[in-house]
Image: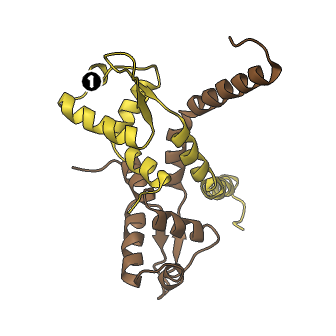
Chain colours: A yellow, B brown
Amino acid sequence: MAVDQLSETFSALADPTRRAILSRLSSGEATVGELAEPFPMSLQAVSKHLDVLERAGLVARGRRARWRPVRLTGRPLEDATRWLETYRRFWEASFDRLDGHLRTIQEGAPRE
Amino acid sequence: MAVDQLSETFSALADPTRRAILSRLSSGEATVGELAEPFPMSLQAVSKHLDVLERAGLVARGRRARWRPVRLTGRPLEDATRWLETYRRFWEASFDRLDGHLRTIQEGAPRE
């Protein structure tokens, strides 16, 4: 079964190492070796994570240079953010309720 | 190994049925039966998806009523959105570049 793009994006983001790789790439492109450096895992393990990120379209690898630098590609992150933003009112509403409740307690006013 | 909250959230979102369930719940709480209705799958299969969503803290089930209505809880979605928003400049930058390039072509100006 073909996996839809949004599922692929969220699935790729569901791992702390892969998120750390994206975070590193947000300050500029890097080689696989550079990306692997901070992690207590083999170059091969990091390469596998990069494969997942590349399949999800979250990173791209240079074709020209022999060291094939990896860079971040923003588009799937944008789609994921847009999907999540449609739920913004839910968390904002929860905070509003909590905020209102706390104010009521502080002011000693009767609760609605 | 304990899975961090953000990974659990993204993992729960990496499925079109689970996202459709959240979308349905965004218009109000519902019973498992109501949630299962639009899907060509068993009640048990929908229940499993709900378990994943509940473990990730994305939905909560009523304790009082016998039919235990399911409702959306926004907090994990907020954390996920905040994480994604730190990458906003990447997709905005790509569009800026594309936009600038298209304008250059339309105006017949020499490319930078």
The answer to which image quadrant residue A90 occupies is: bottom right
- x, y percent for residue B48: 36, 73
> Seen from this angle, which residue lies furthest front?
B108
The answer to whether residue A82 is above or below residue A41 is below
Q: How many marks?
A: 1
- At mark 1, the secondary structure is loop
Q: Which residue is located at x 37 percent, y 65 percent?
A: B52
Chain assignment, label 1 = A
Extreme residue toward the left, this view:
A42
The residue at 36%/31% (across/down) is A21
Viewer can see residue A40: no
Residue A110 image point, x, y percent: 71, 65
Image position of A53 (left or right of A96)? left
Query: Is B43 positioned to the left or the right of A110 in the image?
Result: left
* Classed neighbour count for the residue bearing mark 1: other residues with Cα under 10 Å, few (<14), some (14–19), many (≥20): few
Comparing A20 with A110, the one in front is: A20
- Please give left or right for residue B58 compared with residue B27 in the image: left
For residue A46, side relative to residue B111 (left or right): left
**Quarter of the view holding residue A13:** top left
Instruction: Tell me where residue B41 appears, x and y as whole percent.
Output: 42, 80
A69 and A92: which is toward the camera: A69
Residue B101: tell me if it is visible: yes
> Dot 1 corresponds to which residue?
A38
Quarter holding the C terminus of chain B is top right
Q: Residue at x 43, y 56 (%)?
A: B14
Q: Amino acid at mark 1?
A: Pro
State the residue in front, B51 or A96: B51
Compared with residue B28, is residue A16 higher up or lower down, i.e. above or below?
above
